[in-house]
Image (tube, grey):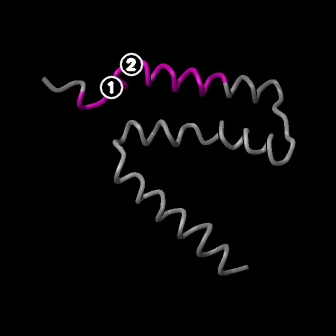
Amino acid sequence: AILWTGWVTCAYTIYAQSFGQRRVNPTDSNLIYTTQPLFSSMFAYVLLGETLGFYGYVGAILIGTALWMVSASDGGSLEANKT
């Protein structure tokens, strides 16, 4: 149990995250990590049968709207500001 908790859930996930972030630009990386609460709630619904309350739906709408606004614009990326 100690090996699983220390190695797989902590060390491997940190390694995997840094490995992936090296291959994705910062804006896309941030957008991917911002979707984590949405995917967590979807997995909780599918696997555990949990449901969202009113504030959960409001939060999901706010996260989705923010993601849409950033992805629809240039997102303030450095590449878009270069001349």
- Which of the pair 75/48 is nearer the observer? 48
Outermost residue toward the front in this view: 46
Q: In the structure shown, which secondary structural element does the residue marked by tag 1 occupy? A: loop
- Disc 2 to disc 1, how far (Cα)? 8 Å
Residue named by callout 2: 73
Which percent across, then down, holds residue 34?
Answer: 54, 38
Q: Residues within 10 Å of mark 2 (few under 14, many from 20)?
A: few
Residue 4 is covered by the magenta coloring: no
Image quadrant where one finds the N terminus: bottom right
**Total of numbered circles in the picture?**
2
| Above or below, comparing residue 5 to residue 33 in the picture | below
Identify the residue at image location x=42%, y=54%: 20
Image quadrant where one finds the C terminus: top left
Q: Main secondary structure of the magenta part?
A: helix
Which percent across, then down, holds residue 40?
Answer: 69, 43
In the picture provided, is 30 more to the left or to the right than 41?
Answer: left
Outermost residue toward the right in this view: 49
Which percent across, then down, holds residue 29?
Answer: 43, 42
The reply to whether callout 2 and callout 1 are in contact (CB within 8 Å) is yes
Q: In the structure shown, which secondary structural element does the residue marked by tag 2 occupy? A: loop
Q: Report which quarter residue 82 is drawn in.
A: top left
Identify the residue at image location x=45%, y=39%: 30
| Above or below, comparing residue 19 to residue 76 in the picture | below
Q: Report which quarter residue 78 is drawn in.
A: top left
Residue named by callout 1: 76
Q: Report which quarter residue 61 is drawn in.
A: top right
| Above or below, comparing residue 68 to residue 1 in the picture | above
Q: Amino acid at mark 1?
A: Gly
Identify the residue at image location x=67%, y=73%: 5
- Which residues make up the magenta segment? 61-79
Q: Amino acid at mark 2?
A: Ser
